[in-house]
Amino acid sequence: MRGKIAHTAKIARRENGDITLIAVSKTHPADRIVPLLEQGHRVFGENRVQEAQEKWPDLRAKYPDVELHLIGQLQSNKADEAVAMFDVIHSLDRPSLLKALAKAMDKADRRVPCFVQVNIGDEYQKGGVAIGDLPDFLEKVRAADIPLAGLMCIPPAKIEPAPFFAFMGKLADANGISGLSMGMSGDYETAIMLGATHIRVGTALFGARG
Ligand SMILES: *Cc1c(COP(=O)(O)O)cnc(C)c1O
């Protein structure tokens, strides 16, 4: 995986170190995660607050420098717990959640960098800020003093993702943003070619989820 990432980065004329591999450990128990930790990997992604609370406090006690990313949708009533547990949140996607997270960060006196999720395929069933609403929403994020990590997307399933990744790059440029969370097991190389700074890879690292 590391070799493929480095090779793709080289083709794209990018620095390997500018690409963060988030090992998506959702559904996998601690004993599947430990081997990666032992190899020195420290950046992990989970998609549910409760699952992270069950798995990670023990692992963190042993590997305190772990960086935990929340990649799944977040309910506003879980904002406090998310701010306490995670180092980065990838799913900031609506004004109500923005308010809840800002409040939670004030209360905890802890600023958690957030990616703003963009509904890049304009899919009604998916989370994410509508493309047309993005500039306004980014303004609100900045006004709330939430550190902006970048933009995140999950492109539509079963169609070529490259045009969506390319468009994400344009949106990032247009808004003066450098962080781009995009690319999963099936398409991370494409995402790196098109500017991803954070790739979220589960299956290709851990095997299929049960
Ligand atoms: C599960 C998940 C991933 C990882 O998907 P794989 O195809 O297993 O690599 C990435 N991003 C999000 C938001 C996910 O929920």
Image (tube, rainbow, N blue to C red):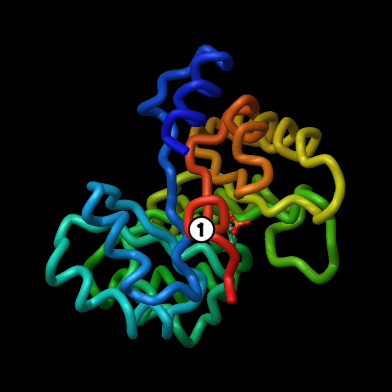
Residue 197 on image: x %, y %: 49, 36
Asked whether mark 1 and ligand 1 are closer than 8 Å, the reply comes as: yes
Check disc 1: other Cα within 10 Å, few if <14, some if 14-19, many if 20+: many
Residue 114 on image: x %, y %: 45, 56
Residue 153 on image: x %, y %: 65, 51
What residue is shown with label 1? 90
Residue 184 on image: x %, y %: 61, 49
Q: Nearer the viewer, residue 50 or 111?
A: 50
Which image quadrant: the C terminus? bottom right
Quarter of the image where one finds residue 111: bottom left
At x 42%, y 85%, the residue is 50
Determine the secondary structure under disc 1: strand
Q: Nearer the viewer, residue 40 or 153?
A: 40
Determine whether, in the image, residue 48 is placed left or right of residue 146.
Answer: right
Quadrant containing ligand 1 reads bottom right
Determine whether, in the image, residue 108 is placed left or right of residue 11.
Answer: left
At x 54%, y 45%, the residue is 181
Q: Taking 207 as reference, is 61 above or below it?
A: below
Determine whether, in the image, residue 25 is placed left or right of residue 202.
Answer: left
Q: How many marks?
A: 1
At x 43%, y 61%, the residue is 45
At x 68%, y 61%, the residue is 128
Residue type at numbered disc 1: His
